[in-house]
Image (tube, rainbow, N blue to C red):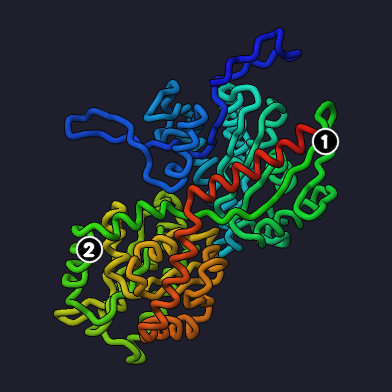
Amino acid sequence: MSEATTAADSDTDTDYGDFDFIVVSNRLAVDRVTDDEGNSSWRRSPGGLVTALAPVMAKTDGAWVGWHGAPDETLDPFDEGNMRLVPVPLSEDEVELYYEGFSNATLWPLYHDVIAPPEFHRTWWDAYRRVNERFAKATAASAAHGATVWVQDYQLQLVPKLLRKARPDLVIGFFNHIPFPPLEIFAQLPWRRQVIEGLLGADLIGFQRPSDASNFLRCVRRFLGHTIRQQQVQVPADGNAPAYVSRAEAFPISIDVNAITELAKRQDIIERSREIRRELGNPKHVLLGVDRLDYTKGIGHRLKAYGELLEDGSITVEDAALIQVASPSRERVEQYRLLREEIEGAVGRINGTYDTMKNTAIRYLHHSYPVEEMVALYLAADVMLVTALRDGMNLVAKEYVAARTENRGALVLSEFAGAADTLRQAVLVNPHDIDGLKSAMVTALNMPPAEGVRRMRIMRRQVLQNDVERWSQAFLTALRNGSAVNNDA
């Protein structure tokens, strides 16, 4: 733990915190759980980001700054496992305006190619700016002198600049987990300049795909006019703040490979996968879609293509079954309520037309499931359908590949998902092309076994060699190497 710098050590009045490594994200790395007796406790979140960064936390005396999930509640910092948790309070109004509003009804659709129309409201922007300031203040108060801070995702794009202004001693990284849109789309944002300036506060800005980094740099050049050499932005001096270099690079995120492969080899999960097929009537083919119920995921396109395959007679309900897991998502947002009605209506029409007493065309599951059940579903499925209209990465595709330890199975993968950059042996598809999507499904279902094994083996090698820990280490190594250049300057 770094000691707080004394007045003799510094020519400023800055009060430094205690932590050398800080992660900042909209949500903390824990979930609150309540037992049958009403007692509450905290449990580490199951996500890959937490898994990747927990070892770094343990080695570097780390803290995690984020909202704890309950509005209108203020909590003191607390410890859980080997990390310090610093809750940032949000009011009910701020959840509505900053999170559901600006983050998920302005930025989310804008960054996903305006598949749904974004809304621009000044009250939402004001809340977004105010909450970002609160996150930055909590982070600055927790960070030791010279600490490394890694800010996560689109909800906190203003934090890097705010941190650099408050604490120029910090090494600041930012990672954008969703796509970054082309200049022509990003230009619609009334606060485009403020967002770009906010991101450029980071020494290193990470994106999922090289195209995302290129889109960002085009926006920097167009709206700020900064000099860009290769992927380095020359940020000019601003008042007393010196000039520095901010870099934009691609760091494709991955999964906790070991956790998935270990589960895939467990006998109880293998038996559960067989039970799933029996529950479906032991069809010849099982297809699987696993998504948050979100308009970016292309669920409607997938269902349309599958329904037409049944109508064409290319598949029959006796031979094939589609399992569609659609986890609940943002159900307070009107667009998501309408999407749920649309998807459930499509499932009802297809099942009403093609179901028999013994067989169901689509088994639709509007639930979230534990990872053990998800791995059992991956093992049960002959074909995984990932038909996102736009996706930063799509880790479900990588989880499916990791789970296929016997190198069997086929992946139909949208070329608009970041995973398509590396999983080139998938059956790649443009999900807007319904005939092409139908053809891809048929190709996957009828792929010769030797060809399927060859493709899956190559994809598994890629996923196994590039897990989420390697992703985090690659980013942090690049961040620290680049910060040395700025410090030397």
- Corner quadrant of residue 255: bottom left
Q: CA distance from mark 1 to mark 2?
A: 57 Å
Residue corresponding to mark 2: 270
Q: Residue at x 27, y 54 (%)?
A: 372
Would residue 428 appear left or right of 318 to someone viewing this image? Answer: right
390 on left or right of 190: left
Q: Where's residue 288, x and y in %?
A: 34, 70
Give the residue at mark 1.
243
Kindly state the secondary structure of the residue where label 1 is placed.
loop
Instruction: Tell me where residue 466 appears, x and y as whole percent.
Output: 50, 57
- Give the residue at x 52% y 39%: 25
The 10 Å Cα crowd at callout 1, few under 14, some 14 to 19, many 20 or more, is some
Query: Which badge, 1 or 2, is on the more N-terminal residue?
Result: 1
- Residue 139: image quadrant is top right
Q: Nearer the viewer, residue 429 or 459?
A: 459
Q: Quadrant of the C terminus?
A: top right
